[in-house]
């Protein structure tokens, strides 16, 4: 057998041109506009009882972060370059940390507000916007420190895998310190689990519009997505593991949008009679 010529190997990565990459990119890009549309509805209806009862400022911040969550999925698609490998996991970790921190702050504010109504309670000083912003800042800073340590000690970098499939070069991002990635995802899961437990315990509190039931479902869906991602990521190789992470990002962000905001948008748009102070007061009297 003469070895007098070279054959080009196929370079495999999740690209915008192939059907899988194009579908995921189109889904992420179109989904980016949904939280912004809901945000515009909230801005227009900011004086209505349902919007005011659910911590308007935190809801707006959560919607903005959810838009960036959908956008962060786009950084995983395309040829893995140095700056893209550095950006994508850190961006994903930070925007989701702010999202889950907002939900945790919402849950804790419901608990504080209810406990503060009891005679002699000292929790009234904790049921303030400053405390909720402090919770978000503290939880987000822990994720930022984790990402900063990861990027400074062993940052992700592009590499070519020529061992997995003979005749195929897999262009991918080596995550560097792989444990740091799982610590980042584990920290998000911890925040979601704490939010889930608090929301579940507070689901029957007699609030005028208690959204802890929606938080319970949203955190349950979020945890289910990322728990399912673990075994799938172990068995997958090449562009398919990237595609599964993109899918997990988009699906978990959609779970938060649907569970947290879809019921409220339905009431605002199609049941304006239920978006009134009188209706919420009647509902409150029935629950107490």
Image (cartoon, grey):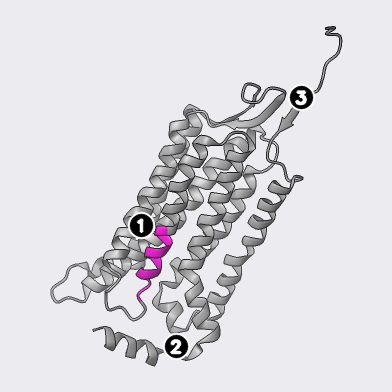
Residue on which disc 3 sits: 9
Q: On the picture, is 38 further left or further right than 284? A: right
Quarter location, residue 14: top right
Q: Quarter of the image containing the N terminus?
A: top right
- As measured in the structure, the alpha-carbon distance from the residue carrying label 2 to the one carrying label 3 is 63 Å
- Point out the stretch of residues depicted in magenta: 210-220
- Disc nearest the viewer among 1 and 2: 2
Provide residue 55's location: percent of width, then percent of height: 41, 72
Taking the view exactly as shown, the residue that stands out farthest to the front is 1
Taking 268 as reference, is 23 left or right?
right
Number of residues whose C-alpha sits closer than 10 Å to that of mark 3, classed few (under 14), some (14–19) or many (20 or more):
few
Q: Is residue 283 above or below residue 121?
A: below
Label 2: which residue?
274
The majority secondary structure of the magenta stretch comes to helix
Q: Position of residue 174 (x, y in %)?
A: 57, 29
Residue 235 visible within the image: yes
Badge 2 marks a residue whose secondary structure is helix
Tell me whether circle 1 and circle 2 mark residues in contact (CB < 8 Å): no
Instruction: State the residue at coordinates (50%, 79%).
Output: 46
The CA span between labels 1 and 2 is 33 Å
Q: Which residue is mark 1?
A: 134
């Amino acid at each position: 057998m003469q070895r007098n010529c070279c054959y080009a190997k196929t370079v495999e990565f999740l690209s915008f041109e192939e059907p899988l990459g194009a579908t995921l990119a189109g889904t992420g890009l179109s989904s980016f506009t949904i939280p912004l549309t809901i945000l515009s509805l909230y801005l227009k209806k900011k004086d209505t009882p349902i919007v005011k009862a659910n911590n308007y400022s935190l809801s707006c911040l959560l919607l903005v972060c959810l838009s960036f969550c959908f956008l962060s999925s786009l950084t995983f698609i395309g040829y893995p370059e140095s700056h893209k490998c550095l950006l994508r996991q850190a961006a994903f970790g930070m925007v989701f940390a702010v999202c889950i921190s907002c939900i945790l702050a919402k849950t804790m504010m419901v608990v504080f507000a209810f406990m503060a109504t009891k005679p002699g309670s000292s929790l009234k000083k904790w049921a303030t916007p400053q405390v909720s912003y402090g919770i978000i800042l503290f939880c987000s800073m822990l994720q930022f420190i984790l990402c900063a340590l990861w990027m400074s000690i062993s940052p992700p970098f592009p590499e070519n895998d020529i061992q997995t499939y003979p005749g195929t070069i897999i262009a991918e991002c080596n995550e560097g310190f792989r444990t740091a990635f799982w610590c980042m995802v584990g920290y998000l899961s911890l925040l979601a689990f704490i939010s889930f437990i608090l929301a579940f315990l507070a689901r029957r509190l007699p609030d005028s519009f208690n959204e802890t039931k929606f938080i319970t479902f949203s955190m349950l869906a979020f945890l289910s997505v990322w728990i399912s991602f673990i075994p799938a990521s172990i068995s997958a190789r090449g562009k398919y593991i990237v595609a599964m992470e993109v899918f997990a990002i988009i699906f978990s962000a959609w779970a938060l949008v649907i569970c947290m905001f879809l019921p409220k948008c339905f009431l605002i748009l199609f049941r304006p009679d239920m978006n009134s102070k009188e209706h919420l007061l009647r509902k409150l009297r029935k629950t107490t």
